[in-house]
Amino acid sequence: MAFTNTRVTEPQDWEMTIRMASNITIPKTLPAKKFYFLEYFYVLLKSIERFSDEERVFDSFKILKQEHGLGESKYKKLTSDGDNLSQTQLNRYRYTFEQVINEAKEYGLVQKNNGNLVLTEEGKDLLLLHQNRGLISFNRSILGLMESKYGAFRYLITFLYNANKHKSGLFVLPNYSPRKLDFQRNKIKTTSDVFEYARVLASKLEQDIQNFIGESRDLEDENKKILDRLVDSDLLPASQNSEFDPKKYNAITLRFRDFWRTYFLREIYKSEYSLSAFDVWTYRGKQIGIIHATEFYPNFKGGIVYPTSVILDSVNSRDFQKLYTYPDGFGLYMHKPVGEENREKFVDYLVNAYFDLCRSNRSYFINLLALRELVCYNMRISEYLFGVFLETIYKLNLVGNLQIRISLEVDRLPEETSAMYLKREPVMVDGKYRNIIAIDITKGGK
């Protein structure tokens, strides 16, 4: 299991956050409009810069939405919906359009005058910022607007640290389908088969709770609850040897997923947030670099979230960059390690994680995106910062000034596959996207 057999560090700065920020009142809801990508603000502002009539703004919004690959989920789209949108697609576009407008109005970026949409001075400034300094600066400016209105990231980051002090804010939502636990679909036919899957699943979840939260839980009673509900709702026959309707298989597995997700949220983490609001804010935080979220951590099935930032009244380390100051003097600091010492640490983490993956994959070339997950977790850094570090050491490698040799290649880029969504972005290094890596420590530099 990757969290236990890779080299995991827990920086002391995170422990300080738990002590100093634990007195923050956590709200029961995290208000947010239902869209993930902060680029939607840019798409809206750019459309209003061009047009004022709402329908023409919407037409521009639709075009730019597709050009930027923005979908309704947390993943960017690799395919275009085309020009001839169905009514269902139009309704989704319209809903997202209205959600973005409403949130932009809350931040004072746009307003309506005589039925037309116009940019405020703040909206014009933000659009100019994107033009002059790019998406990263744009997103961080949006961060300031969101925190001044809601303070949601402060609450969320504090919640994560308080929810799991055992691993400094690590939040996991395991998701084990029957197939992931080696139960073949064609062999799950009877109530007894489902009960056996449920038993193995509960045992696996008990292990996860011990590993990630540091708690011992007996899930026998909870397991009985979900099985009783399946029988009571007629998804499963009461008789152990009776076969269930195979058309109900997906409904049964979804019931397991939803039941245990709710259990982890409510009983393990004591969360009162809805899963949808939690997802929206964590993936927004990921774009800014203050929270990491993934569903592709090596050798783990499910989603994980952890902070890559701290909430403190002050920070003496230059490894933290202040992004926002709250009215009470506390600040939101993103972990951004700098300098040669941290570059050397990055190399150490990269090499250690690489060989951990080599042992489990039995291959010289390793998936770079899987390696990125391990290094980001161990260093508590964002995906963007991982790319910056890798770019730096790769260039040192090219001129022979690194004590290891790195080979970066591309297997197939997402757009070269039949995938509809960009679920994991490849890493841009030296002007090219890369997604596989090999490291040789037997051949040093000069």
Image (cartoon, grey):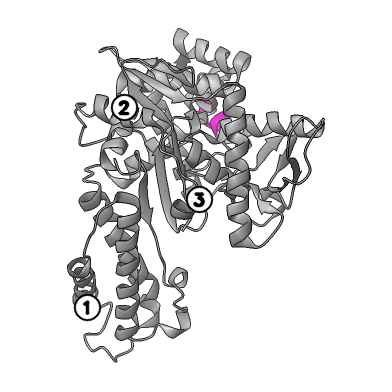
Q: Which quadrant does the C terminus fall into?
A: top right
- Residue 203, how many percent across, how many down? 31, 69
| Residue interval drawn in magenta | 57-61
Residue 347: which quarter of the image? Answer: top right
Q: Nearer the viewer, residue 357 or 385?
A: 357
Residue 156 in sight: yes
Mark pair 1, 2: CA separation: 48 Å
Q: How many residues crowd mark 3 within 10 Å: few (<14), some (14–19), many (20+)?
A: some
Mark pair 3, 1: CA separation: 41 Å
Q: Residue at x 47, y 51 (%)?
A: 295
Please say if 416 is above or below 239.
Answer: above
Mark pair 2, 3: CA separation: 24 Å
- Magenta span: predominant SS is helix
Q: Which residue is farthest bottom?
A: 241
- Residue 237, how many percent across, how many down? 25, 84
* Residue assigned mark 3: 6
Q: First in sequence, mark 3 or 1: give its number.
A: 3
Give the structural element (helix, strand or loop) at label 2: helix
Q: Residue at x 77, y 30 (%)?
A: 401
Q: Residue at x 30, y 56 (%)?
A: 210
Q: First in sequence, mark 1 or 2: give its number.
A: 2
Identify residue type, mark 3: Thr
| Dot in front, 1 or 2 | 2
Please say if 75 is above or below 115.
Answer: below
* Residue assigned mark 2: 16
* Residue assigned mark 1: 231
Identify residue type, mark 1: Val
Identify residue type, mark 2: Met
Give the structural element (helix, strand or loop) at label 3: loop
Q: First in sequence, mark 2 or 3: give its number.
A: 3
